[in-house]
Amino acid sequence: MTPHSSWWRSTAERGGGLVCWLESLCALIAAPRACNVIFTANSGHELGHLGLDDFLTRRPGWERPISEGGATRIHFGGNIGAADGKLSLRSASDDLRQLTEAELVRHRSSAGYSRSQTLVRSGETRDIGRAGRRCVSWVRSNPLLHPPQERWPHAVDTDAVARVVAATIALVFKLTR
């Protein structure tokens, strides 16, 4: 899942997550998978995740934790492609975090990244990682967050986006096979 709305044009804030989302979708269409996969690109993340809340409200049962048959969630958060940013990986699930870290290392996306065992209970990961949910969230810092100058090409690190996309596709394949 990824938010798609933002301030101004927000190329660095939303672009990288949308690229990860689209490339994962294309990769899964081209290859068979062993489970259902749902992609959501929600609006309103800056307004308390109104789009995600609406999506989940219309799908009873999707709120279940993994122990009750709930889904594994990958959240492509903000600033994945931000120039001069630092990638951060958040997950309360040890196995999912380790699997994600291994793909980041394998695709050279781990340089300068930080990790957290728990999910932040505010901002982008507020609703995505409630207790019991198997979720990993990728976000990156962004020195140009929300001003009008956050535009292509100076605000985006395309090499970083490409490496995260490669790690993302590998992770998605492992989770769906």
Image (tube, helix red, strand yellow):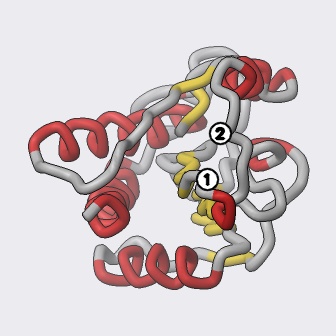
Image quarter hosting the C terminus: bottom left
Q: Residue at x 37, y 64 (%)?
A: 175
Question: Which residue is tagged 2?
Answer: 62
User: At numbered mark 2, what does the secondary structure look like: helix, strand or loop?
Assistant: loop
Residue 24 appearing in the image: yes
Vertical order, 57 against 103 (above or below): above
The crowding category of the residue bearing disc 1, from other C-alpha atoms within 10 Å (few below 14, some 14 to 19, many at least 20), is some
Counting from the top left corner in percent of width and height, residue 68 is at 67, 59
Amino acid, disc 2: Trp
Q: Is residue 97 left or right of residue 131?
A: left
User: At numbered mark 1, what does the secondary structure look like: helix, strand or loop?
Assistant: loop
Q: Is residue 62 left or right of residue 173?
A: right
Q: Is residue 44 left or right of residue 59?
A: right
Q: Residue at x 56, y 52 (%)?
A: 71
Question: Which residue is tagged 1?
Answer: 70
Counting from the top left corner in percent of width and height, residue 127 is at 79, 43
Q: Is residue 167 left or right of residue 124?
A: left
Q: Residue at x 34, y 58 (%)?
A: 172
Counting from the top left corner in percent of width and height, residue 21 is at 39, 39
Amino acid, disc 1: Gly
Q: 142 or 88: which is nearer to us?
A: 88
Q: Residue at x 34, y 77 (%)?
A: 108
Cα–Cα span, label 1 and label 2: 6 Å
The answer to whether marks 1 and 2 mark residues whose Cβ atoms lie closer than 8 Å is yes
Q: 51 or 59: which is nearer to us?
A: 59
The crowding category of the residue bearing disc 2, from other C-alpha atoms within 10 Å (few below 14, some 14 to 19, many at least 20), is some
Residue 159 appearing in the image: no
Residue 7, by quadrant, is top right
Residue 46, by quadrant, is top right
